[in-house]
Image (tube, rainbow, N blue to C red):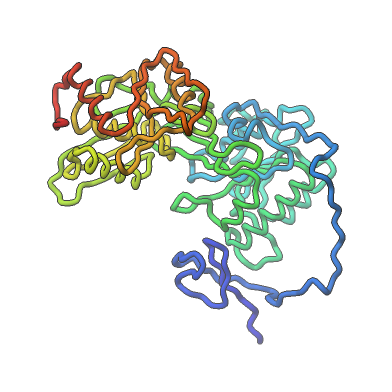
Amino acid sequence: MARSNVIFVCQKCGASQAKWSGQCDSCGEWNSIVEEAAKDTTPKGLTAKKGRKIEFVGLKGSEKPLPRMLSNITEFDRVCGGGLVPGSAVLVGGDPGIGKSTVLLQVCAALSNIKDSRCVYISGEEAIDQVRMRAERLGLADANVELASATSVRDIVASLDEHDAPTVVVADSVQTLYVDNLDSAPGTVTQVRTSAQELIRLAKRRGFALFLVGHVTKEGNIAGPKVLEHMVDSVLYFEGERGHQFRILRAVKNRFGPADEIGVFEMTDAGLAEVPNPSAIFLADREDGVSGASVFAGIEGSRPMLVEIQALTAPTAFGTPRRAVVGWDSNRLSMILAVLEARCGLSIGGHDVYLNVAGGLRISEPAADLAVAAALVSSITGVPVPAEVVVFGEVGLSGEVRPVSQSDVRLKEASKLGFDGAVAPEIHRRFGSKKKETTPNLKVVRIKHLEQLLDYIRIEGEKNPPKNVAANLG
């Protein structure tokens, strides 16, 4: 009996090869290659069947685009770019138990209130009774949402490919779906790619908004081939720490709105509640007069966000000090520590350093460099940064403080929340905007180098001498 053709496919990048190996030649991942059956590996040319001639149209169409669908969940609509676009495909990923299914069920229930709308929730992981139990807990038992429990893509397409197709479809999750003419198991690269392609093609043809829930790997990336993120129109990541009640919905890709936009939710007994003013929430439990803390004025998408950065330094008896970071880039922290020691003469090499972004928020923009440096200097000197002052700016390797974008928006947000001072980089009019920056009710201290930050903290320490100083500035 002839052996059927098989191929070996990497579950990380989707590359195929003729034989199994421990490491993928394309992406370098170990133990990611799985054997899959291939019914026909002989490539067929395009000469056997003549293609259909396609029709080209102008760039400016005569038809008006369909209006966006608003869920009236402001934080969700903000992340989507102002509402859902009909015919779009949205991939939602996040850690297990973070709230992906909860927020999508809430969105479905909210969108079902739109006139002539039909919302369908298809679960491949839970039974219908389990989804109903969650809906009852969320207070959504009376919502006009149609439920189904299915994993066969053929059955799902046959049920949705009708003239009265739904307006919103949720598939939870794409890793549980399978196409029956493929021999590979559900969740493999081939099944995930093919299942998503069939559903996205149907969504474009019938004009309904499609949500695909995706699992994540231990590194935090969406499981399956990377091409899955290229196929969809938007990719949303649900972030949050298990110890915090806040959840961040972040858009890392959006064809219909700005990327890196975030929506802030709070996990409650009745589901996810939106947080209209995240800055006030993140700074609610802040204590005044504590060393090692600074308030960073950041920008998340199009929204200004104020968050507290906490630093703790402690002498260590070991040869290799510890560096622990939560919510920020550890490589960036190492760079700031090296600059403070090499350019400013601050001795930190013999200290353990712990850095935390309060509230569970993850910061990625370089504008947080100066706020991190202020928290570190405050911790090692024992001099608190003034509680009514915000700090932002990018730090270079020579110790210079570089300007950042949208500084006027950051200062306005600080003024709105009651802050009366700021430490910020100087404005370079040659490269910056010619528009005059307005800083209402704020006393802004402009600095060019990190040494000026140390001088600023030294002056504050002379005004209000700390009770216990671990070190001094010389």
List x then y, in percent, for residue 108: 66, 34
Foreground: 345 or 196?
A: 345
List x then y, in percent, for residue 341: 22, 41
Residue most toward the bottom? 1
What's the residue at 67%, 59% (across, down)?
194
Answer whether residue 189 is visible to the viewer in this image. Answer: yes
Q: Is residue 32 left or right of residue 171?
A: left
Q: Is residue 322 left or right of residue 278?
A: left
Q: Is residue 242 left or right of residue 162?
A: left
List x then y, in percent, for residue 199: 71, 51
Foreground: 303 or 227?
A: 303
Q: Quadrant of residue 80?
A: top right
Residue most toward the top? 441
Q: Quadrant of residue 326?
A: top left
Quarter of the image where the N terminus is located: bottom right
Q: Is residue 162 above or below residue 2?
A: above
List x then y, in percent, for residue 357: 36, 34
What's the residue at 41%, 12% (across, down)?
441
What's the residue at 46%, 66% (across, down)?
28
Answer whether residue 241 is visible to the viewer in this image. Answer: no
Q: Is residue 416 above or below residue 434?
A: above
Foreground: 145 or 64?
A: 64
Q: Is residue 381 left or right of residue 221?
A: left
Quarter of the image where the C terminus is located: top left
